[in-house]
Amino acid sequence: MNKTNQTSTRREFLRQSALTCGTTVASMAVIALILPDDAYAAGTTSEYDWDKHRWVYLIDTRKCIGCGSCARACRKENQVPEGMYRTWIERIAIPPEGEVHVDSPYGGEHGFEPDPPNAHVRKSFFVPKLCNHCSNTPCTQVCPVGASFETNDGVVLVDPKQCIGCGYCLQACPYGSRFMNPHTRTADKCTLCYHRITKGLPTACVQACPVGARQLGDRKNPNDPVNEILATQRVQVLQQQLLTKPQCFYLGLDMEVR
Amino acid sequence: MGHELIGFLFPNDVHIHWTLMIVLYPYVTGLVAGAFIVSSLYHVFDREELKPLGRFALAASFCFLSVATLPLLNHLGHPERGPMVVVTPNFSSAMAGFGILYASYFLVVILEIWFVFRADMIRYAAESRGFKRMFYATLALGVYDTSEEARALDHKITRILAAIGIPMACLLHGYVGFLFGALKSNPWWSTPLMPVIFLFSAVVSGIAVLIVLYQLAMKIKGMPIERETISALARWLWLFMIMSLTLELLEIMTLAYEKAEEWEVIGPLLANQLSISFISVQMVLGGLIPLILLGIVVVMGAYMDDRIRNTLSMVASLLLLMQVLAMRWNVVIGGQMFSKSMRGFRDTYVPGMFEKEGILAAAAILILPFLLLVVFERILPTFDHLGQKTGDLNLDLDSEPRLG
């Protein structure tokens, strides 16, 4: 084999390899572009279009009676492991002087003891908590593999098939909304009952609340009563100073609630 | 677990998610970065007094680097998915940088080792027979050129790699600090000082471990402990520990003086949960005492008996190794001793002896790099070249070693 011949074969080889590599990368890119939407659309009903909804959550702390029905419903609906909480209820008791008392025995799941912890307390109320489904999420930002993500309709989810279980998102969430599921060994959190809301059902907690303290709203539905409240009343979010833009809004929050 | 909760914790905050393994991970990478920087002080900046350690420090860095991922893998809920951090990284996550940083740094270290030890590998291949010869010939990757020019080139490449390695070591370890420092959810972690503190304490631990290992290695090999080497290491260690300690104190003092909202949890945290590990161990026993001991070595070094200098620097180094470990503990565990409700604390956290991420597993991971180092030393001795003249190797090697 002479030298020229060798060079041309090599050039040919390089050209072929470049072509193969290029085609592979291009097709992978196309697959990557198509895949996410398809994959998640597959889990929902065919008529559901996630671009037509924007879920928000509204909690009226003035209505909550601390019965714990929501937390029990959540555990049952989502098989939440014992000792872990996708939602919980806090009781805040603020005496005229001295320390604020906060408690949440078993996440408030079994209700609260009737006696106030401090007899002098004149301001006491319940605050249900859950994932705030922030639109500027610190938790999805830190996920090293993108297993935690935000859906187009505004729900923050974890894909248990991708989660590596590093726990970085647990550390990044300022609200303590996430936990490590001991069975799946992956990060777990409130899904806003995505399997229900995409079928037109309310979340388990909203359905279980006997006093209507919890409401699910859809920002893209002009007739949604939650939109009316958000538009006309003074609402607050938790830890506003962190600028995570929670999509879970509160009525009647006190400055002592964190 | 036998721990008590004080005040109100968010119900999901009663668990310690990042355990002893996450304490070890920055500790081990710190040793990597520190040892590498010492090696580079010789290879790049020609600090002749560090010549005895130039190769050894590189080997130590490599051995620590080899085990650096183990604590992480042991921690992951799904270690089998660990490689996905490299395969499908989510670049908005600081952690996604890990694979790239780690892999490229590993590459630099391996390449540097190859160029530093290349002539040795060829010599060992030439001097031995059979399997051993084949082994060294394989290590040398079939290149048997030990001419003057080839070795000059080795030298040049080594210097370039060592130079590239410095910013990379800084990146690798600064990145570890960044993982903590860039989380706004945690007031004990969230500070731009965190990467810098991690970096300086990394260098401290790296130099300290080299002082200990160098003295041990010389004892074992029956070689003299060079006065200049120990003096130089002690000087560098003193400098870096002062900087590291200053930064650690600055962070606390700023928070305390500002009476920032963070202080509401950090004040009680330091006074109670971390009183022993932070104040007693990190600041006094591991901070103040080595500061004094090394100060003596540095200031009065010229009048000092070698044995006293060696002992003082050995004790200071051991204390500093403990200090840096305590610092990692205080950051990682300390940051999880309070709830994000900012109203409640755990009273203690004691890792179990036999659990998956417990004390025994941690000890095994910590011992492993030292065992690796012994093996490395067997294969590619790092001190032997010191005794020899660095003249021509004058090998009786043809283009290929005769196998068999």
Image (spheres, coloured by chain):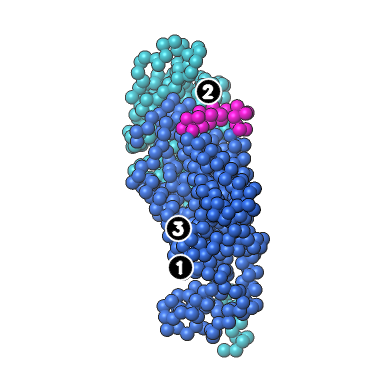
Q: Name the front one of labels 2 and 1.
A: 1
Mark 1: give few (<14), some (14-19) or many (20+) Cα within 10 Å.
few
| Tag 1 residue | B378
Which residues fall within the magenta stretch? B253-275
Q: Is residue B270 magenta?
A: yes
When the figure is inspected, residue B278 is found, relative to residue A105, above or below; the finding is below
Task: Tell me the quarter of the picture where residue A199 sits.
Answer: top left
Q: Residue furthest bottom?
A: A2
Q: Amino acid at mark 3?
A: Phe
**On the image, numbered disc 2 is attached to which residue?**
A229
Label 3 sits on residue: B370
Disc 3, SS: helix
In the rendering, at what x and y percent does residue B114 appear?
Answer: 55, 69
Height in image: B260 above or below B303? Answer: above
Residue A225 in the image: state x and y as whole percent: 49, 25
Whether residue B17 appears in magenta in the rendering, the answer is no
Q: Could you tell me which residue is drawn at 50 percent across and 80 percent down?
A: B126
Colour chain B is painted in: blue
